[in-house]
Amino acid sequence: MSDTHAQTVAYVRDSMLPEKPPPIAEKGAIKWLRENLFSGWLNTALTVLSLLAVWYALMAIGPWLLNTVWNVQSLRECREVLDGASGACFAVIKDRWHQLLFGFYPPQHYWRPVLTLVLMFVALAPVLFSQVPRKMLGFSALYPFIAYHLLWGGSIWLPVSVILGFVLGYVAYRLLARFAPLIAIAGAILVPVIWWIMFAAGFTSAMTSVAPIGLDFIRSDRFGGFLISLVIGVSGISLSLPIGVLLALGRQSDMVFVKSVCVMVIEFIRGVPLITLLFTASLLLNYFLPPGTAFDLILRVIIMVTLFASAYMAEVIRGGLAALPKGQYEAADALGLDYWKAQRLIIMPQALKISIPGIVNTFIGLFKDTTLVVFIGLLDPIGLSNAIRADTDWNGIYWELFIFIGALFFIFCFGMSRYSMYLERKLKTDHK
């Protein structure tokens, strides 16, 4: 400090005061409560009413949930143990958990759906998380065939013949790409179709007679419970996204025929209830197949559920495409990119990033809609709960079964929701 300034200031502090803690109302839980729950009279009134509602709910449900019975064999024995008191009889879950999870799948083969579920998480890891090595994407591509063989069994040469069809299609695309892109795409589609229709069955029979490798075959009517919900839900989710992308691109195409077909498909499927499509899969689809064709009911349902979800997915992605500024398309043109490179490198990554909430919302709705298969005779968890309640041992029990089923559905749907939020934070879709 200069001498001149020292003469003009009456007092200058030469030592710092020690730091003091903030007032108790400006830190910690009290600050959070004051700012979030009691910031005004309306917020305070709503908080009090909410606390009262939670309190009355806990007082009504709490004693019933806390007084549970797990080790009896029937509802009559459960009521004898409770002796007139209010209580939950979760013994039905302990007694019938295998039916709720696996349906009528043979108990000695429970390891197969369990292994399929574990491998599904392994296959999803490189798709969902960028930290996982990209080399594992090869296993992700093979997983559908591995899952089919584990769940249904039979000769291993059937999924191998299907894989060979894709390999031949890839080879045809690479060989024909030097002529013209459309010829290459047509070859990549026609070659595997011809292989599957004309040669795959003979290849499978010949290889099975030479090397009969495989697992015991399990019929589709033995599937049930959450196993069937996961098979239909995961298949529909995995297939509806790429089909929805193609439908969205087709609807925005300048080619009149392609655009008209995509619009008709989307509008027709969106205008028909899912239950109608399921009845079509159950009763009518076989009429459109060649005589003598026995097409598996679960596969028919997967096709219809996938088409239904693809139509909604296409509209969600079209919303993302519409949100992109025109400059992004012009930038792709300025770089000299062709249509598919522009979509793959510039347009679609941004459109999918914008559409994440809608995509995950469609996935969650699709997974919950798998319970509708009960109306065409497939015993999903809801159908099996009706079968369990029809048993004389558990006739009259309701809430325990539905709480268990709802909890498992909540775990899967909440997991998808949390992953969506993680992906949004990672990609910063809000552009803050």
Image (spheres, helix red, strand yellow):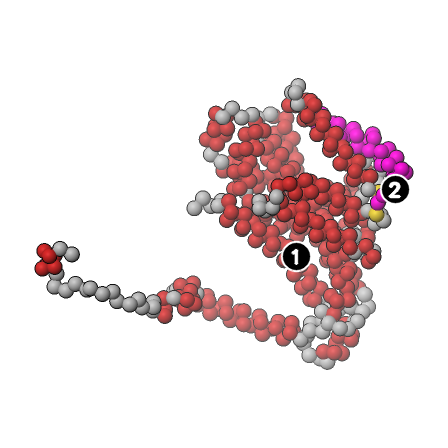
| Residue 241 disc label | none
- Magenta range is 186-214
From what the image shows, is residue 259 above or below residue 220?
A: above
Task: Examine the structure image and report whether residue 211 is included in the region drawn in magenta.
Answer: yes
The amino acid marked with disc number 1 is Phe
Q: Nearer the viewer, residue 168 or 326?
A: 168
**For residue 75, side relative to residue 45 (left or right):** right
* Secondary structure of residue under mark 2: loop
Does residue 353 show up?
A: yes
Could you tell me residue 19's position as x and y percent? 30, 66
Q: Is residue 219 left or right of residue 308?
A: right
In the image as oriented, which residue stretches furthest toward the right?
A: 209
Residue 167 position in % (x across, y down): 73, 32
Compare residues 425 and 413 and report the one nearer the observer: 425
- Type of amino acid under label 2: Pro
* Nearer-the-camera pick, 100 or 151: 151
| Residue in the image at 65% along x and 37% along y | 243
x 77%, y 33%: residue: 164
Residue 163 placement: quadrant? top right
Q: Is residue 192 magenta?
A: yes
Secondary structure, mark 1, is: helix
- Please tell me whether residue 37 is drawn above or below residue 106 in the rendered image: below
For the point 78% across and 55% down, the residue is: 111
Q: Residue at x 68, y 43 (%)?
A: 140
Q: Which residue is mark 1?
A: 409
Local packing at callout 1 (Cα closer than 10 Å; few below 14, some 14-19, many 20+) is some
Q: Which residue is mark 2?
A: 212
Q: Nearer the viewer, mark 2 or mark 1?
A: 2
